[in-house]
Amino acid sequence: MSNSYRIARERYAEFGVDTDIALQQLAGIAISLHCWQGDDVGGFENPDAGLSGGIAVTGNYPGKAHTPIDLRKDLEMAYSLIPGRHRLNLHAIYPETDRQVARNEIRPEHFAGWVEWAKGSIQGLDFNPTLFSHPLAESGFTLSHQDAGIRDFWIEHCIACREIGAYFGREMGTPAVTNIWIPDGYKDTPVDRASPRLRLRESLDRIFAEEIDPQHNLDAVEAKLFGIGSESYVVGSHEFYLGYAVSCQKLLCLDAGHFHPTEVISDKISSALIYVPELLLHVSRGVRWDSDHVVTLTDELQAIMQEIVRGGYQERVHIGLDFFDASINRVAAWVIGTRSALKALLMALLEPAARLRQLEAEGDYTARLALLEELKAMPFGAVWDHYCWQQDVAVGYAFMDQIKAYEKNVLSKR
Ligand code: RNT
Ligand code: ZN
């Protein structure tokens, strides 16, 4: 044990905080890494098809993964630099097939390679139907499309994805969260805002008609304020999905980049959890028009993790990441974003929670403010370093040596 950790442990103990217990708790929290950071949301369905449908990736940093083997290798590298045991979040465009399989015909066997790999490497798998980058999504509408045939196609796709989620859950022994996000919306002001929403509700009802054991699969729905090409109207708005998730008791997915610039998801967690059973978070970072910058240790990231820990919601909030940056080393992006999320979690776990609550209950807001501010100067970094050392991953900035070596030996040769 380093001297700096010993000193940090004493400093936190003065506030009644046991750093060893905080680290044990942190080790029990699995974050779901999103596979799509590794290849700019490309997928393996059709190597020639580009990303389209309301989201975009910018940058052309060399070395992106082109095959499942590349992607898994990159993920292994990333996981080896992130302390703890974590999950992988797959999208439906990442199957392993010898010919192109239509989206409404994908089956568990097309993802068997992922399961085999995941069993030896990670804690669990999550899933997402892909309702973009496809000719039948080109119009900007999928589950809420006017055309019943197009809706049916996407409904079948989502049903197939729930089955794959259940397969992941059974095989991994931990439920998969299968999250539905659709790009549906209008670039310019519509005159009929209601009909697409009524159609979306009907499509979702059909997708969820079959009960699936929640031990295997949990369904989530993800709202958005606006997207590229849906600036004026998004069918699946926050109110739409909050209402849907409450009435059908589904998981609500809150993406940190999907709200007005000054609106934060940290404040939504305690309200939503009164009415929905569980939440999925897409931890992301909005920057102006983009909702998907690499996660950094911002005030809002800290606030999100504080809410989870202060509320004791660890069992009801699934933490997933959602960002894509092709302008920097993609493996490093995973590592930086996940390590930041874990740092924020650790900071939250190191709070003298009982004392802060007591000050608030007593109405001593002066002391509450003073303590919250002093906590920011506590030797958190020494506890984080100790955790990385304990979990046998690179301590501090040293992880970049491994990233650079991997870039030189592997990525630059692709
Ligand atoms: C898009 C949503 C969605 C996607 C992924 C790739 O705005 O955030 O979660 O990022 O499905
Ligand atoms: Zn998202």
Image: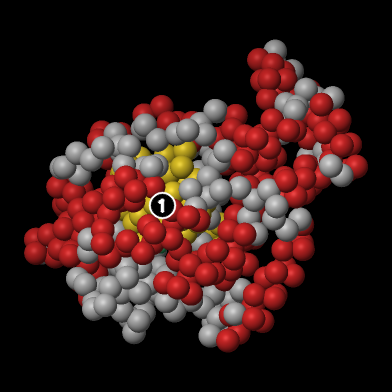
Residue 287: percent from the left, percent from the top? 56, 62
Residue at mark 1: 125
Q: Secondary structure at mark 1?
A: strand
Q: Residue furthest left?
A: 148
Camera-side residue of 365 and 336? 336
Residue 5: percent from the left, percent from the top? 84, 41
Does residue 373 appear to the left or right of 41 in the view shown?
right
Q: Residue at x 21, y 72 (%)?
A: 101
Quadrant of the image containing the N terminus? top right
Specify the quadrant of the image occupied by residue 91: bottom left
Q: Residue at x 75, y 28 (%)?
A: 18
**Disc 1, ligand 1: is the CB inside 8 Å?**
no
Does residue 67 appear to the left or right of 5 in the view shown?
left
Q: Is residue 41 above or below residue 154?
A: below
- Which color scheme did the rendering employ for the protein? secondary structure
Hey, what amino acid is under mark 1? Answer: Leu
Residue 190: percent from the left, percent from the top? 25, 61
Q: Residue at x 30, y 74 (%)?
A: 45
The crowd level at tag 1 (other Cα within 10 Å; few <14, some 14-19, many 20+) is many
Specify the quadrant of the image occupied by residue 251: top left
The answer to whether one can see residue 225 in this image is no
Does residue 303 appear to the left or right of 290 in the view shown?
right
Q: Residue at x 60, y 80 (%)?
A: 410
Residue 169: percent from the left, percent from the top? 34, 46
Camera-side residue of 77 and 221? 77
Q: Is residue 221 above or below residue 107?
A: above
Q: Is residue 138 above or below residue 90?
A: below
The answer to whether one can see residue 37 in this image is yes
Q: Residue furthest top?
A: 362
